Amino acid sequence: MAIETLQDLYVEELKDIYSAEQQILKALPKMVAGANHNNLKRAFEEHLEVTRGQVQRLETIFAEMDEKPTGKKCKGMEGLLEEGSELLKEEGDPDVKDAGLIGAAQKVEHYEIAAYGTARNMALQLGLESHAELLQQTLDEEGETDKILTGLAEGGVNKDALIGRRNS
Ligand code: FE
Ligand code: FE
């Protein structure tokens, strides 16, 4: 479709985000299974729950506009998740891999933070206050997840990675 108006661009942006979230829903269970630290597993599990709610918010927005969320693939997220899945397949020290998984997950969160920030600003520009509010809620959750991941890295995972199972 042609992108003539800010509204067109907004819908395209939201479709991209919707595709990204769908891909994340599929990837998170693999991250849970691949993580070694229990608190990292739990963080991924919790984010899976949170992500389901985020998808619902997007569906609410699409329904309000009488648009379908499908028809676009987020290639950025596909690439980020591909990097994560390569890491999961690597052999190696499980604590070192956890440090890598946190980094991979934070790249995903930062992509989402950029995308939701953009979409929220477009919604405000278009006078779609209720959309902006929903998108802000998700933006806050992504930011919170990013902080939790930083906390896990600083709170022990990186140190465990430094010590390494094999050297201890
Ligand atoms: Fe999300
Ligand atoms: Fe997220």
Image: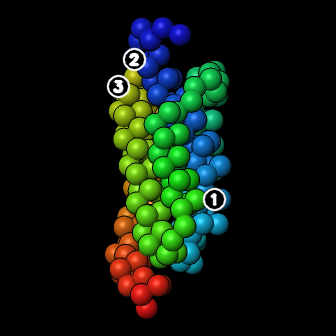
Q: Residues within 10 Å of mark 2 (few under 14, many from 20)?
A: few
| C-alpha span from label 2 to label 3 | 9 Å
Whether residue 75 appears in this view of the structure is yes
Disc with the residue nearer the chain's start (2 vs 1) = 2
Residue at 42% over, 8% down? 4
Q: Mark 3 points at which residue?
A: 125
| C-alpha span from label 2 to label 1 | 37 Å
The label nearer to you, 3 versus 1, is 1
The C terminus - image quarter: bottom left
Q: Are marks 2 and 3 in contact (CB under 8 Å)?
A: yes
Q: Residue 162 in the image: state x and y as whole percent.
A: 35, 80
Disc 3 marks a residue whose amino acid type is Gln
Q: Name the residue under label 1.
A: 30
Q: Residue 113 in the image: state x and y as whole percent.
A: 39, 46
Which coloring applies here? rainbow
Disc with the residue nearer the chain's start (3 vs 1) = 1
Q: What element carries label 2?
A: helix
Q: Is mark 1 on a helix, strand or loop?
A: helix
Which of the labelled discs sits on residue 6, or is there none? Answer: 2
Q: In this view, does 144 lie to the left or right of 36?
A: left
Q: Quick check: 129 above or below 65?
A: below
The label nearer to you, 2 versus 3, is 2
Q: Are marks 3 and 1 in contact (CB under 8 Å)?
A: no
